[in-house]
Amino acid sequence: MIFRYPFINRLSKIIWCSFLDLFTVIENRRSIRKYKQKSVDKEKIVKIFETTRLSPSAMNLQPYGFVIISKNNVIKEINSACNQIWDAPIMIAVCAFPNQAWVRDDGEEYWKADAAIAMSNISLAAYNLGLGTCWIVAFNEEKIKKILGVDSKARVVAMTPLGYPAENKGPVTKRKTLDELVHYDKW
Ligand SMILES: Cc1cc2nc3c(=O)[nH]c(=O)nc-3n(C[C@H](O)[C@H](O)[C@H](O)COP(=O)(O)O)c2cc1C
C-alpha cells in the first residue's frame, strides 16, 4: 500500500519489515502440510515475490520463473500429478531455464542451485508473513508442465503450497550437530 506522505511510507516499511529477525525465521520455519481454508492477500504474495526477486544467482542470470496457482480446479489437477495431496489456497511452481543459467567450465550446471535459493527465500519470506510452505519435489514433472503450460525449455524444480498453517510444529529440530557438519581449516 502506498501512502501520500513519504514519512508514513517509511514508517509502514519499518513496521512491515520488522516482523521477525532472520535468525528467528530460520529457527522456526517448518514444512507445513496442513492449511487453513483462509485465503492469502495479494499484498502478501507480492511481498514474497518482491523479496524472492532479490535472490542471488550464478552470474546474476536469474534463470527462473514462478507460477502462482489459486484456482481450485488447477490445484486439484496438480494433486493428480503429486505423490501427496496438497490442500492449500495457493500452490507455487518454481521453474528454471537450464539454457539461461550459468555453466562452469567443467560443465557443472547451476540452474537447480539458483532455483533452490529462490525457493528457500519464498519459504522464509512466507514464514515472516505468518504463512506456511513446504518444499515439494515428489511430483511428475511432465504432468505438472502440461497442467501449467510451462515453457518447454523450462524445468519445474520444486513446488510449494502457500497458506495459513493449520498445524503448529514448533522450532526446527532433528538436525546434525555443528561437529558433524563443520570443519575448520581442513575437512
Ligand atoms: C529438496 C527438498 C525436497 C523436499 N520434498 C518434499 C516432498 O516432496 N514432500 C514433502 O512432504 N516434503 C518435502 N520436503 C520437506 C522435507 O521433508 C523437510 O524440509 C525436512 O523433513 C525437514 O523438516 P522441516 O522443513 O519441517 O524443518 C523437501 C525438502 C527439500 C529441501
Image: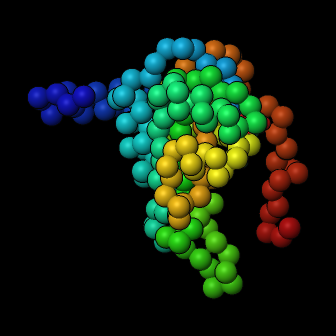
* Residue 18 spot, x, y in % from top left: 42, 30
Give the position of the N terminus as an image quadrant: top left
Q: Nearer the viewer, residue 179 or 77?
A: 77
| Left or right, 180 with reference to 111 | right
Residue 7 in which image quadrant: top left
* Residue 66 spot, x, y in % from top left: 48, 47
Q: Nearer the viewer, residue 58 or 98?
A: 98
- Residue name at image x 12 percent, y 29 percent: 5
- Residue name at image x 53 percent, y 65 percent: 153
Is any part of residue 104 visible from this angle?
yes
- Residue name at image x 53 percent, y 72 percent: 99
Ligand 1 quarter of the rendering:
top right
- Residue name at image x 42 percent, y 42 percent: 49
| Left or right, 181 with reference to 8 | right
* Residue 6 spot, x, y in % from top left: 15, 34
Give the position of the C terminus as an image quadrant: bottom right
The relative height of residue 31 versus residue 117 in the rendered view (above or below) is: above
